[in-house]
Image: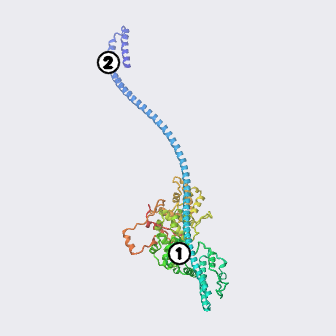
Amino acid sequence: MFFFILVSRHLLKKPSQVNHHSSTNNETYQERLARLEGDKESLILQVSVLTDQVEAQGEKIRDLEICLEGHQLKLNATEEMLQQELLSRTSLETQKLDLMAEVSDLKIKLVGMEKEQSEYEEKQNKAEGLLQELRHLKIKVEELENERNQYEWKLKATKAEIAQLQEQLALKDAEIERLQCQLSRTSSHSEVAERDQEVQRLKIGMESLLAANEEKNMDGTVVSDDLSPLSLGMDSGPQSPLSLENRKSPKGIKKIWGKIRRTQSGNFPADDLGLAEFRRGGLRATAGPRLSRSKETKGQKSDYNAPFAQWSTERVCNWLEDFGLGQYVIFARQWVTSGHTLLTATPQDMEKEMGIKHPLHRKKLVLAIKSINTKQDEKSAQLDHIWVTRWLDDIGLPQYKDQFHESRVDGRMLQYLTVNDLLFLKVTSQLHHLSIKCAIHVLHINSFNPHCLRRRPVEESNVSPSEVVQWSNHRVMEWLRSVDLAEYAPNLRGSGVHGGLIILEPRFNGDTLAMLLNIPPQKTLLRRHLTTNFNVLIGPETQQEKRDITESTAYTPLTTTAKVRPKKLGFSHFGNLRKKKFDESKDYVCPMDTNPGATNGTQKNYTGYKGLSPLTDRELDQVGQTD
């Protein structure tokens, strides 16, 4: 448009110039006019072309303006989105700070909860210890009540015996008085001699009666010096019973019996002496059986070294009491006639005749009788059931003390203990089975020495695996305190961890100990510290063997939740049970042969550990499967 205006102005100026020079340039006017018209036409064409171009450029400008407006809108939207993102980012940063503050608070709370948990576990352990002490006190109270009842029965029986003896003495006094009267009336010397002999026989009978009573009450009977033959007029010399110096009134013997003080103890058995003792054919409170009882007592003294088959009923009952099976003495007195009765008895006879329903009580008695028959002097028989309860404390399983005490498990039963016996004793944890197995193995190696386990630290500088294998649970806790893990040491109470399990069980490693100590998996530095000290403790050979077991394909780690299930017999096993007796030796927790063998495909060498051989889990795998 601007170009068109310039062209029009130029055309307007041309006529004025032509008029101004018309006088001088008339000749060239026409030529110039024609040229100008040609220029005008060319300019018109150029103007039209330029107009078209201007219109096209205007359309492009409008399109660009439209695009510019669109891009401006997009730019505004993008700026708004950017502002929103910035706002959201600031909010996220504030939320992140809040979350970090919450995480720090939660960590503080977690530390506090761990401390509370450790305190609670310590209180729980103390409460368990108090409960166990309370149970032991209850057992002692029951035993004291049983003893009181037994003493009451003995007192009643003794009073009845004293009353009967007093009646018999009164009869004897009356008979002596009657004989003295008859002797005073007779004058014949022969008759006097016969009466003297009869009186002497009566005196001898009285002396034997007093002697029997003295032997029965030797520990608590007090007899005065007036019981001498001279004071009773019973001198062994040939004095006449008719002499006034030797005559005694009938009240004299009663005075003597009044000076005798009976105690509640005697030669009767200490357990369950009731009215069943005074049945027909048994012991009676009369003079005759008293004399026969004194002879039996002398016989017991004479055949003290007699074989078990020749033992009397009383001696067998006393042996049962010392053996820890005193509750079956009442039935034993009614059934056992001598030691030969027990030697030939079967477990069915013991259950039927003696009322031994408890299977481990029967096994205890059967093993003892078998040892007597085979004349084997087993060192494990010297460890009674009280020692076994202390042994459970040493290996870290005090929670089973009540079951073992009630079952009267002694050292011999530990030697022949089976997996089914442990399940009957409510020991179902696979880890606890392995703990008892390794502990029994340590007893085998040390010939059932009651003092083989070490409870206190001696020297920490040089500790070999052969010494670690004899560590008790308390000694392992002391080792944890020495390696700066004292806060986790109480967690080993009731875990069954001892030196034998640490060395002899190939699957027990540092991770297993960390799991039992309740060390969280997040505390990698603490677990690494424990593993390093554990490897130093067990030595390079055992460390390599445990590593080989861990890298094997059949390796399964130990857990606290794994249980041992009893083996279920299928229909194919019933024929074998009918054909031959079940071999219990294949089911022992710790077989008695200690020949070295392979464990999970690897051969182990325990020559440095005083001949200790490795233990396999074959017995447990045969009897049960783990959950």
Residue 446 image position (x, y, % from top left): 56, 71
On screen, residue 184 above or below 486: below
Which of 77/394 is in front?
394
Which of 33/201 is in front?
201
Which of 427/500 is in front?
427
Residue 41 is marked as 2
Residue 515 makes an appearance in the image: yes
- Label 2 element class: helix
On screen, residue 504 above or below 42: below
Q: Which of labels 2 and 1 is toward the front?
A: 1
Residue 602 image position (x, y, % from top left): 48, 67
Residue 338 image position (x, y, % from top left): 51, 79
What residue is at 38 percent from the left and 19 percent from the top?
2
Outermost residue toward the front in this view: 185
Residue 317 is marked as 1
| Marks 2/1: CA–CA distance | 156 Å
On screen, residue 491 above or below 436: above
Quarter of the figure with the C terminus: bottom left
Report the amino acid beneath label 1.
Cys
- Label 1 element class: helix
The answer to whether the residues at label 2 and label 1 have Cβ atoms under 8 Å apart is no
Disc 2 crowd, CA 10 A, few/some/many (<14, 14-19, 20+): few
Report the amino acid beneath label 2.
Glu
* Nearest to N terminus: mark 2 or mark 1: 2
Residue 168 image position (x, y, % from top left): 57, 79
Residue 591 makes an appearance in the image: no
Residue 278 is marked as none
Q: Quadrant of residue 321?
A: bottom right
